[in-house]
Image (cartoon, rainbow, N blue to C red):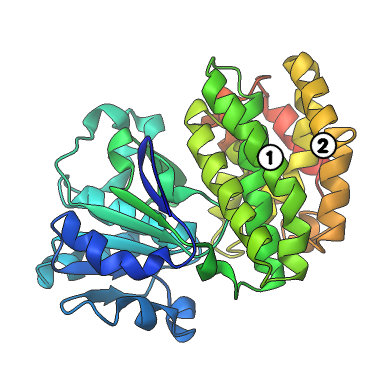
Amino acid sequence: MSSISYLTRIEFGEGEARRLPELLAGIGVHRPMIATDRGLVATGLVARLTESLDAATLFDATPPNPTEEAVMAAHRLYVEQGCDGIVGLGGGSSIDLAKAVRLLTGHPAPLGQYAAINGGVARLHGRICPMIAVPTTSGTGSEVGRAAVIITAEGRKLGIISPHNLPTIALCDPELTYGLPPGLTAATGMDALSHCLETYMAPSFNPPAEAIALHGLETGLHSIERATRFGQDRAARRDMMVCALEGALAFQKGLGAVHALTHPLGAIRSLNLHHGTLNAVLMPAVLRFNREAIGEKWTVLARLMGGEPAEIVAALNTRLDLPSGLVAMGVTDAMMQDVSQAALHDHCHATNPRTPTRDDYLEILHQSR
């Protein structure tokens, strides 16, 4: 077991999830809400992890792309049951929903006013309940991220960003990912790799974040195919959780055009697309777009990845049996038109190393068809 202090407290290691009751007591939480989803409940994992919690309240209605409606329902339950802390248990959706419920323990609704693009950072404070994040996938890194990405009441997928959003404890146990199906392992793993790539390319000066991103990228590239094919591979599962963790520790530096596009794509309610899969499909075209702006970083990436980065990612997507493109995922030309405009207003647009226009975004989408 290792205790790490970088942005927030991280408890990492096989079997560490069994410490959840002890860790909750240590931060003064006696009546926690468990925010998760019905699919995870059906596996029996939630019951196993929470069976020794005497006064826990379960909210299991987290949608694949969390909505303000679901957040408000969870918050009402939190208040009704007299909860005094929250556990986000699951993938990034459950953890982001838990973060948004936590925000509402100290701030009034609606959530849109706290989005970064609406000047919300200055409106947030730390007088909110404690939280433990327990990831069961190796992808989003939300357990150590400052953002809660929520589809707000007006239908936009927005990032609510603040250091106060960092969970009190990130409880990272690779054993919780052993049963993850191959397709979800691949998609969430590509999410983690996209974080490492975008953070490294982002233009702001943060050498520690870049070093962490490169280590996460190398670790993930080495392990993602093995973790996908051999789900019980202890070393591969551990490495992918490290990749996800490091990608999110690093993206405090900023993301870029991939996420500026995947956020509005993820807000298309009729499709309900998986965030990591979208990142994987868009990454090759964004790498090509950014090449002229990142200078020596392209050489560093090519050396680490063993070839031209865009082609390496595209080939990896194929070997992992991810969708061939956006059209195969149901994205239409009309949707692309709307998304290319919405991307200009996403908080990740500003930290891409080369500033895209609407036409640039549309071309990236068309290249990713």
Relative side of 307 to 362, left or right: right
Quadrant in which the N terminus is drawn: bottom left
Mark 2–mark 1 Cα distance, whole angstroms, equals: 9 Å
Residue 160 visible, this orientation: yes
User: Which residue is at a point 30% across and 77% down the rendered structure image?
Assistant: 50
Rendered location of residue 158, percent (x, y): 44, 43
Q: Residue at x 71, y 33 (%)?
A: 361
Q: Is residue 6 above or below residue 314?
A: above
Task: Look at 49% across and 37% down and name the residue there.
Answer: 249
Q: Is residue 137 above or below residue 58?
A: above
The residue type indicated by label 2 comes to Met
Is the residue marked by circle 1 packed among few (<14), some (14-19), or many (20+) residues within 10 Å?
many
Type of amino acid under label 1 = Leu
- Where is residue 120 drawn, in percent x and y? 30, 32
Left or right: 297, with 13 as reference point:
right
Residue 6: % across, % down: 40, 35
Give the residue drawn at x 32%, y 48%. 167
Q: Indicate which disc, 2 or 1, sits on the residue closer to the N terminus.
A: 1
Determine whether label 2 and label 1 are within 8 Å by CB: yes
Q: Which residue is mark 1?
A: 217
Quickly name the residue at label 2: 305
Closest to the observer: 229 or 126? 229
20 shown above or below 304: below
Determine which quarter of the picture holds residue 56: bottom left
